[in-house]
Image (cartoon, grey):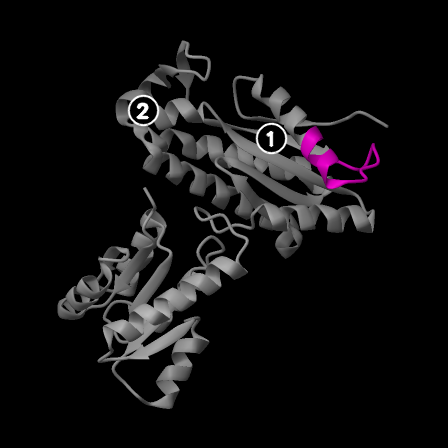
């Protein structure tokens, strides 16, 4: 079954929300909020593909919603259409300045809105190499980042991170809860890399629960430990009270065996060009997969660094 693209409607007028829902629900999956504050909470849980927000609302208006969304690295790429009942140029400009991608005056023609939505979604899918769940850079951007570091020849490290016991968690709690963990790990990776490297660090999402970060070699260990500490502190919150108290859940592993699985943890393999010459991006991937496999042999969150000299 083809997945319907998701649209979040934010408007304090229930009649406008109803009109938008009737106009769009045949084509898209619709979620709704009454103000920008509610909208921000829904964005984090429902992962919409596009947002339509009113300009004037109580609690948090459209421009402020746009500004806050654009400050979140996982959400800043979401396209936004601003609806306004005003025709003054200053309000249109304010919509765009706050981060909206387009604006439409009320009352609007449903066909015009649908055409705008199709245009923006098509443009977004073409221009973004981003993972649809986290909106972090995807594989093409990751390869470009690797190549740029190889070309400069300066000391760098690549951390390959993914989750342990994640399949068993998904089997019991479902994919929506699993997606919450993936987004949580993405935020932890971003916060840790920015803490030690500022805006110079790079975080990418390969897919599923697989991530990479690229940083200066001398920062990699500290970043990895920070990721582990933050994730292990958060991990129990993903479980119900009974499982949290027990410290494990029962499940079936990838080989079909019944197992007792401890709480989800994170494994990181660190590839560096300090002790060996790295000449192509595939080499990074091969070493990263090997190191991550070694890290997964340890029954807790940990990182493994390649110390071989070549």
Q: Is residue 76 magenta?
A: no
Horizontal and vertical percent position of residue 17: 19, 65
Mark 1 → mark 2, Cα distance in angstroms: 24 Å
Residue underneath mark 1:
268
Figure quadrant of the N terminus: top left
Q: Which residue is the site of mark 2?
A: 172
Q: Is residue 79 visible?
A: no
Residue 246 seen:
yes
Mark 2 is surrounded, within 10 Å at the Cα level, by few (under 14), some (14 to 19) or many (20 or more) other residues, namely some
Q: Residue furthest right?
A: 310
Which span is picked out in magenta? 272-287
Whether 129 is drawn above or below 156: the answer is: below
Residue drawn 31% across the image and 28% down it: 173
* 182 sits to left or right of 44: right
Q: Residues within 10 Å of mark 1 (few under 14, many from 20)?
A: many
Q: Secondary structure at mark 1?
A: strand
Point 57% across, 17% down: residue: 298
Residue 224 place in picture, x, y as percent: 61, 35
Name the residue: 34% across, 47% down. 3
Residue at 41%, 12% (x, y): give it.
256
Residue 309 left/right relative to 37: right
Where on the picture, by quarter, is residue 66?
bottom left
Q: Earlier in the sequence, mark 1 or mark 2?
A: 2
In depth, the one of 129 and 34 nearer the eye is 129
């Amino acid at each position: 079954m083809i997945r319907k693209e998701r649209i979040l409607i934010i408007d304090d007028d229930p009649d406008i929300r109803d009109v938008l829902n009737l106009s769009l629900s045949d084509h898209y999956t619709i979620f709704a909020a009454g103000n920008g504050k509610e909208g921000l909470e829904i964005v984090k849980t429902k992962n919409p593909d596009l947002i339509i927000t009113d300009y004037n609302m109580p609690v948090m208006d459209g421009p402020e919603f746009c500004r806050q969304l654009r400050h979140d690295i996982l959400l800043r790429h979401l396209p936004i259409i601003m609806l306004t009942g005003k025709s003054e140029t200053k309000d249109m400009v304010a919509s765009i300045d706050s981060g909206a991608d387009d604006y439409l005056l009320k009352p609007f023609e449903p066909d015009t809105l649908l055409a705008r939505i199709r245009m923006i979604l098509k443009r977004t899918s073409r221009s973004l190499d981003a993972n649809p769940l986290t909106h972090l850079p995807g594989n093409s951007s990751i390869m470009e980042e690797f190549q740029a570091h190889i070309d400069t020849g300066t000391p760098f490290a690549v951390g390959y991170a993914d989750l342990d016991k994640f399949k068993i968690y998904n089997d019991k709690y479902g994919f929506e809860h699993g997606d919450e963990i993936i987004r949580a790990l993405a935020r932890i990776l971003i916060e840790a890399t920015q803490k030690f490297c500022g805006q110079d660090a790079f975080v990418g999402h390969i897919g599923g629960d697989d991530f990479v970060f690229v940083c200066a070699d001398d920062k990699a260990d500290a970043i990895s430990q920070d990721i582990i500490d933050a994730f292990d502190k958060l991990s129990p919150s993903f479980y119900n009270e009974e499982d949290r108290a027990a410290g494990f859940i029962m499940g079936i592993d990838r080989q079909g065996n019944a197992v007792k699985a401890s709480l989800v943890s994170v494994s990181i393999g660190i590839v560096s060009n300090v002790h060996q010459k790295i000449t192509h991006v595939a080499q990074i991937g091969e070493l990263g997969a090997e190191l991550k496999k070694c890290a997964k042999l340890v029954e807790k969150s940990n990182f493994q660094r390649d110390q071989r000299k070549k």
